[in-house]
Image (cartoon, rainbow, N blue to C red):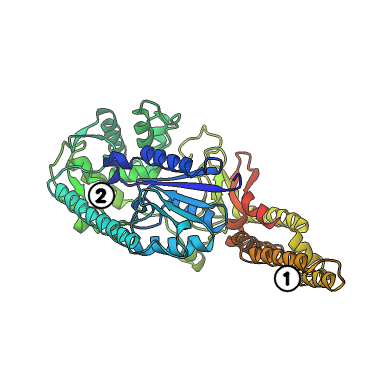
Amino acid sequence: MNNFVVAKYIRLSIEDSQTSSLSIENQRNLLDAHIKDLSLHDAEIIEFVDNGYSGTNFERPAMQRLIELARCGKVDCIMVKDLSRFGRNMIEAGYYMEKVFPLYRVRFISVSDSYDSSHYENDTGGLEIVFKHLIHEYTSKDMSRKIKAARHAKSLRGEYICANCVYGYKKHNNSLVVDDYAAEIVRLIFKLASEGYILKDIASQLYEQKVLTPSEYKSQLRAKPLKEPICIWRPEVIRNILSDEQYIGTYIAGKTKTAEIGSRKIYHVDKSEWIRIPNHHTAIVSDRLFNYVQEGVKSKPKSPITDTPKNRRGYSSPLKGLVKCECCGRTMAQNRKSGKLFSCLHTLSAPDIACHKLSHPAQELEQGVFSELQKKVADILQQSHLVRQEFFSPNKHSEENDFEVTKRELYEKLILGQVSKAEYLADRELLESHSYSVAHSPKSDLSAKLQVIAVNLIKEETLSREYVETFINVINIHPDNTVSIVWNNEALSTIA
């Protein structure tokens, strides 16, 4: 039982949070009690929680991790409170219950529905389970439509329905009231902009005065602040403040919409379709100052860029997005004009921080990472049984040939009378069973795929994105410009 892995899956959407019986703690207690009833308490128990996610689709982080583990053969049983916690989409839920989980020999249990896949063979549980899926899906979509309609009606009435209000205000009884501290910072930003300061210079001024950023200020309002404030303002945050009409008292809503019911993907709505109510709440800056700043921003000339194919296309490094500043922990940006440098832009306004103006040549970094990656993979491949067999020792038999040789040797022992017929049949059945499990193991499929990638890597002359994403998690640039690589040890161990 120690090798048996039970995964508890718990989901709570925003709407479900109003129902105490569906709380995370109640779901957890119910699953723990059922595990005890089934005498599975000696098994390895792991838990996956999606808090605030709709069940109408399976694009949920914990669910995706759970499914990936199931496909890798690392989960033996999945347990949920009821089918609606697993998913409210009948087609997708049925696909996993009927096709995916049986394929990878994963037992599926829905406690409240009294469903246990071990009691059914290649079946979802009959019409009763199908109708439950239909009811859950319809209920979820109907609830989403009603909530969406109610929120739109509140927006038209000028009620502030967002969970977080714009910096400079506080939410009180579904309306906006001025936050005195934050409002003074907003006025300071508009004053500096009206005096001709560009975004970078405004950020420097705010850093010198140790003004908390909006996220830091929000954190300080909590009983236990999340971290020590650094007071580094990003230019885009300042730009958003300078262009936000809510600071002149205009109510704005409907800037985004969901792609479809149950989806977490949103798209931006054209400004002409926004809900606007002028003079809705107390203004922080005057209309005159706001309009003056907008004209000043529009009139600032942009830096000329030579219109060459190289600059139009740019150069996207295969390391893009994975290069981090070890000092501040931020992703280092690739130079937009030439792509020659990875630079830490976060601390441009903070000259006293170690990574101020830190940069590293992109080509030099790629060559160094590629060399280290090839060396790392080659060392592992030389110790790999499969690679020694296929690539370094061509006279060895492949795994399939080994199976045939062993089976022939076993038959020869039977003919020579070295084993009885019963022993021969038992050994052959065991051999065939092992061969089948290896051939159909998800882990072996993944291992074979990664080994092919690894073997191709050591033959390559240039670095590609596929190799980076497969074997590297993060590339850290230190303030002294040294480089350290955080390897994907799970992938590297798989090819060993």
Image-based side of 366 in relation to 89, left or right:
right
Q: Residues within 10 Å of mark 1 (few under 14, many from 20)?
A: few
Q: What is the x, y in percent for residue 265?
A: 34, 56
* Quadrant in which the C terminus is drawn: bottom right
Q: Is residue 194 visible?
A: no
Q: In this picture, is 131 found above or below 289?
A: below
Q: Which residue is mark 1?
A: 400
Disc on the earlier residue, 2 or 1: 2
Q: Residue at x 87, y 72 (%)?
A: 416
Q: Which one is closest to the eye, mark 2 or mark 1?
A: 1
Amino acid type, mark 2: Glu
Q: Residues within 10 Å of mark 2 (few under 14, many from 20)?
A: few
At numbered mark 2, what does the secondary structure look like: helix, strand or loop? helix
Q: Nearer the viewer, residue 282 or 430?
A: 430
Q: Which residue, as the protein is rendered here, is positioned at the far top? A: 223
At numbered mark 1, what does the secondary structure look like: helix, strand or loop? helix
Q: What is the x, y in percent for residue 121?
A: 47, 63
Q: Nearer the viewer, residue 292 or 362?
A: 362
Amino acid type, mark 1: Glu
Q: What is the x, y in percent for residue 299?
A: 30, 52
Q: What is the x, y in percent for residue 298?
A: 29, 52
Q: Which mark is residue 295?
A: 2
CA gap between label 2 and label 1 equals 74 Å
Total marks shown come to: 2
Image-based side of 362 in relation to 190, left or right:
right
Q: Residue at x 57, y 48 (%)?
A: 4
Q: Nearer the viewer, residue 471 or 14?
A: 14
Image-based side of 65 in relation to 213, left or right:
right
Q: Residue at x 65, y 66 (%)?
A: 436
Quadrant of the image occupied by residue 201: top left
